[in-house]
Image (cartoon, grey):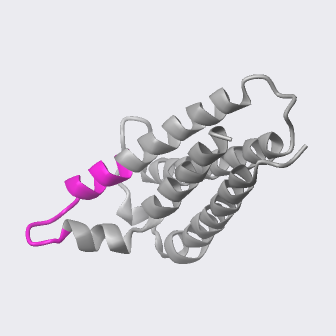
């Protein structure tokens, strides 16, 4: 059995992305956040909203890790029924995340801001689309 090289490459792209994701949160974002930046919501006070922000970040981290685990599992096994279908579902999931990145960036623009400069600065979409491209390639083998 030969391993599915595109799935392995996609897992490495995802590993780089999750590493950057964790580093960004733990080094660049979280230490600079303060509870005063958050407003209370109907769900709770500002401290709760800040904790919810961190939990949501961790959910995304888990998505990356599960994607890596599944890609590596499917890369080294031909015995899993519907593996390609599961990878296609993961591709749809990650494409929807990329679309949400594009839409969110567009909605957050201030007058005079450049959408292209914003998307170059927030380049995580490149990793997502690169990973999805490799996943697609792996499903065609």
Residue 120 position (above or below residue 14) = below
Residue, far right: 1
Residue 45 position (above or below residue 90) = below
Q: Residue at x 70, y 50 (%)?
A: 7
Q: Residue at x 77, y 46 (%)?
A: 69
24 drawn magenta: no
Q: Position of residue 62 (x, y in %)?
A: 67, 47
**Is residue 74 left or right of 109 when viewed as pictured?**
right
The image quadrant that residue 81 belongs to is top right
The image quadrant that residue 10 belongs to is bottom right
Q: Nearer the viewer, residue 92 or 57?
A: 92
Span of residues in magenta: 100-114
Q: Position of residue 116 (x, y in %)?
A: 24, 69
Residue, far top: 81
113 drawn magenta: yes
Q: Position of residue 16 (x, y in %)?
A: 65, 67
Q: Exactly how many numbered labels are in the figure?
A: 0
Q: Nearer the viewer, residue 34 or 54?
A: 54
Q: Nearer the viewer, residue 129 or 62?
A: 129
Q: Is residue 59 among what the camera can see?
A: no
**Is residue 28 left or right of 26 when viewed as pictured?**
left
Q: Looking at the figure, which quarter contains the N terminus?
A: top right
Residue 81 position (above or below residue 6) = above
Residue 137 position (above or below residue 42) = below
Q: Looking at the figure, which quarter contains the C terminus?
A: top right
**Is residue 80 left or right of 87 when viewed as pictured?**
right
Q: Nearer the viewer, residue 99 or 108?
A: 99
Q: Residue at x 63, y 62 (%)?
A: 13
Q: Is residue 73 among what the camera can see?
A: yes
């Amino acid at each position: 059995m030969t391993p599915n090289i595109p799935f392995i490459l996609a897992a490495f792209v995802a590993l780089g992305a999750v590493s950057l994701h964790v580093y960004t949160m733990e080094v660049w974002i979280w230490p600079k956040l303060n509870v005063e930046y958050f407003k209370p919501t109907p769900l709770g006070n500002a401290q709760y909203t800040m904790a919810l922000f961190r939990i949501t970040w961790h959910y995304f981290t888990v998505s990356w890790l599960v994607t890596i685990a599944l890609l590596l599992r499917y890369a080294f096994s031909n015995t899993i029924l519907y593996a390609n279908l599961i990878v296609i579902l993961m591709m749809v999931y990650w494409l929807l995340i990329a679309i949400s990145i594009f839409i969110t960036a567009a909605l957050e623009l201030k007058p005079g801001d450049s959408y292209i400069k914003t998307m170059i600065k927030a380049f995580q979409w490149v990793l997502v689309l690169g990973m999805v491209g490799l996943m697609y390639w792996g499903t065609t083998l």
